[in-house]
Structure formats: structure tokens, C-alpha cells
């Protein structure tokens, strides 16, 4: 069974940085893409960043501040978040696309205080 586990969330002041990590089980050769989404209370889940086939795509609100990258192990993905704003506060979910299907982690809370 595929497991997706996020870590690295927490409380940070506006202007600060956090780095989220995600590790996925299963064969790395079966992974087509990995990404991050977030959901704030009362809002729909939205794209933060995705990396697939060596290309990256970012949500408009995080462009220039966040960077997604794959780890050397290829079953890991990171999200470096700089210049954080209070509106970045949300639960951040890791998404892994396998050839067999799409899987989500349980989420990690990121809170940015003003």
C-alpha cells in the first residue's frame, strides 16, 4: 500500500521561511510526478507547486517565493517556502502521481503570524 508522509510544517513569522518534505513509498520508477497543494479554512484545495517530467509549475500566489524540488532518492519532494505571508497559512498536502493512481498525504499545518 502506498504511503505519503509530509513533515516540516509549523509556526513562523511573516517574512520567514519553512521547508516541507514529503516521502512516498512504492517504486520510484512508478512515480510520474509529485506536488504540493494547500487548503485554508473555508477555501478549496489549491495548487502550490508540481514537478513532473523535469518541469515545474507554480500557483500564481507563490511564484518567486516557493521552490519545489525532488530529492536524490526520487521518492522525495521538497517545498522551500521563503518570504512567507499570513495568507500562506493552510494545511499543505503532498500529492504523488503514480502510473497506478494518485495518492495524498495527511497534510502538515503551516501557520504564518503577522
Image (cartoon, grey):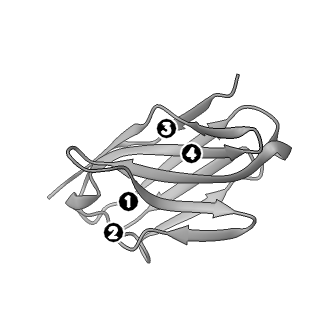
Q: Mark 2 points at which residue?
A: 83
Whether pointer 1 and pointer 3 mark residues with C-beta atoms closer than 8 Å, the reply is: no
Crowd band around label 1 with a 10 angstrom C-alpha radius: few (<14), some (14–19), many (20+): some
Give the secondary structure at mark 3.
strand
Query: Residues at badges 2 and 1 in contact (C-beta under 8 Å)?
Result: yes
Instruction: Give the label on residue 7, or none.
Output: 3
Disc 3 crowd rating (10 Å Cα; few below 14, some 14-19, many 20+) is: some
Return the mark for residue 95: 4
Query: Is 51 placed left or right of 104 in the picture?
Result: right
Cα–Cα gap, marks 4 and 1: 21 Å
Taking 4 as reference, is 99 left or right? right
**As rendered, which of 29 and 110 lies closer to the eye?**
29
Label whose residue precedes the other's in the sequence (1 or 3): 3
Q: Do the residues labelled 3 and 4 touch (CB within 8 Å)?
A: no
Instruction: Quarter of the image for the C terminus: give it.
Output: bottom left
State if disc 1 and disc 4 touch (CB < 8 Å): no
Among the two numbered marks 2 and 4 on one chain, the one whose residue lies closer to the N terminus:
2
Q: Mark 1 points at which residue?
A: 17
Which quadrant holds the N terminus?
Answer: top right
Q: Which of marks 4 and 1 is nearer the N terminus?
A: 1
In the picture as drawn, the residue positioned furthest to the front comes out as 100
Q: Distance between the residues labelled 1 and 3?
A: 14 Å
Q: Where is residue 68 in the image (x, y as percent from the top left)?
A: 57, 62
Q: Which residue lies at the image location 81% right of the left edge and 43% below the top edge?
A: 30
**Between discs 2 and 1, the one toward the N terminus:** 1
Q: Which residue is drawn at 73% across and 68% down?
A: 54
Query: Residue sitting at 56 percent across and 70 percent down?
Result: 57
Amino acid at each position: 500500500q502506498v504511503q505519503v508522509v509530509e513533515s516540516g510544517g509549523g509556526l513562523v513569522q511573516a517574512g520567514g521561511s519553512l521547508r516541507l518534505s514529503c516521502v512516498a513509498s512504492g517504486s520510484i520508477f512508478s512515480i510520474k510526478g509529485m506536488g504540493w497543494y494547500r487548503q485554508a479554512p473555508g477555501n478549496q484545495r489549491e495548487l502550490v507547486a508540481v514537478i513532473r517530467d523535469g518541469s515545474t509549475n507554480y500557483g500564481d500566489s507563490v511564484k518567486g517565493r516557493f521552490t519545489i524540488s525532488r530529492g536524490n532518492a526520487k521518492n522525495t519532494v521538497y517545498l522551500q517556502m521563503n518570504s512567507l505571508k499570513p495568507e500562506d497559512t493552510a494545511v499543505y498536502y503532498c500529492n504523488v502521481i503514480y502510473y497506478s493512481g494518485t495518492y495524498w498525504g495527511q497534510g502538515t499545518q503551516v501557520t504564518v503570524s503577522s
